[in-house]
Image (cartoon, grey):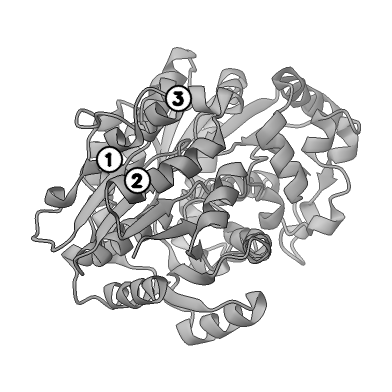
Amino acid sequence: MAKILSFHSFRRGTGKTNITANVASLFALQGKRVGVIDTSMQAPAMHILFGLDESKIKHSLNDYLWGRCKLEQTVQDVTTHLQPGLELAGQVFLVPASSRLGDITQVLRHGFEISDLNESFSQLITMLDLDILFIDTYAGLTETTLLSIAVSDATFIILRLDEQSYHGTGIMVDLAREFNIAKIGLILNEVPQFFNIEEVKAQVEQTYKCKIAAVFPYTPELMALSSTSIFALQFPTHPLTQMFEELVRLLAHEM
Amino acid sequence: MSRIISIHSFRGGTGKSNSTANLSTLMAMRGLRVGVVDTDIASPGIHVLFGLSEENMRHSLNDYLYGKCAIEDTAHNVTSNLKVPIEGEIFLIPSSIKAGEIARFLREGYDVGLLNDGFHDLLDNLELDVLMIDTHPGLNEETLLSIAISDALAIILRPDQQDYQGTSVTVEVARKLDVPRMYLIVNKLPAVFDPVAVKNQVEQTYHCDVAAVLPHSDEMMALMSAGIFALHYPDHPITKSLVRVADLLLA
């Protein structure tokens, strides 16, 4: 039975897209058929991580939601783009969002039918015979956030340790709980390396009364990659990759 | 004086609010009366840097935009929150952090023309030397307006693929809107990158002056937006860079 995992954050620049892309790629490395849908239409980025040039995106999620094309036309098999020369046992399919300024403006002004987005999730799972569907969302509390939380088997809220995140993340956690989601996990990202991870974890768990799914330290090598490729595939033995793999194990176990 | 300066970025998470707060503080330390408007209604955050809590937020920008009060009523004098003697004054016009009010904005939007009126009323009524606008990331009506009425604009980006394309579009649009002075600020530069090389590359790519290349800083990260970096670390290279940026923006 296919699973849906959604990734959220209250603030922007938390590393959500990088994390989603890395986890999805590791599942594919293990032989899973993975779908990734970039619902962050206000600021699309997933295609960048998967090395898909804008010019190659003939049909985007936007086009589907505005009735300009069929859902299958938006799907791109990005498996071979992930790491040149790397054979993956599974597959990664991406439904990208449009980077065209006009499309972004249109989303901001006119939105889209949320029910169409909802339908696309199950359609993708069936159409592509997926094991897992990853939903990457735009930061903040939007209709899409609520929808994704509602349909997910597990939902992850990513945050950096920053006062600006504190209040809003709390709201998101409370909201996710109201949807009675069986599995909500916080992912702490870009934690300063000199911080005591266990202490931080305990403190954050206490503050939000929510389980911590993973704690990732600030990693200069990942920052230096500048979103040009998938870290876990580029640096398979790096401690951070081992942490990604731990998260993958945690998710696989719970599923 | 009486100048409007916008701090903008195409993507979020670039350090825009932190930069705006620090630049505003540095300007106030020169004796200027500085207004700071948080127009990032969907994701307000700069109030945290100025130590303004929800309980102390009497009115927000949202109240003004929905006709509940005059713009001056939304101005909070946060100078003393900084706990150091400052020659000038800082007035913060915050955005509401109440989820319901943010949701309302997302649903209904607001009359952008009111923003323009509000900015000019602030300059007059509070006798401001500078009005700093902490904008909403991305290009939309509000950001276009802020850019269009600004005397100077700083566009912040991280040296990341996710920022490059959109920043290019933003620079183009700003040029078309005839902003008198425009600068780029590259922020959160990983330690392995050469700041001089990055400055040259960015200036070449965007045909725009780079006011500063700010490195990733563990101290900044550890501060967690709990306060103003420039006050905590007055001699830090980042603070010195920000002083130069303030010079450029005020020139």
Residue carrying label 2 = B122
Tell me which chain the residue with mark 2 is part of: B
Provide the residue designation for mark 3: B66
Quarter of the figure with residue A95: top right
Amino acid type for the residue under numbered disc 1: Ala
Dot 1: chain letter: B
Of the residues shown, which amino acid type is indicated by label 2? Leu
Q: Which residue is mark 1?
A: B75
Q: Residue placed at 46% from the left, 48% from the top? A: A14
The mark total stands at 3
B95 and A139: which is toward the camera: B95
Q: Nearer the viewer, mark 1 or mark 2?
A: 2
Q: Secondary structure at mark 1?
A: loop
The amino acid type of the residue labelled 3 equals Tyr
Q: Secondary structure at mark 2?
A: helix
Mark 1 touching mark 2, by CB under 8 A? yes
Please provide percent x and percent y for residue A254. 52, 27
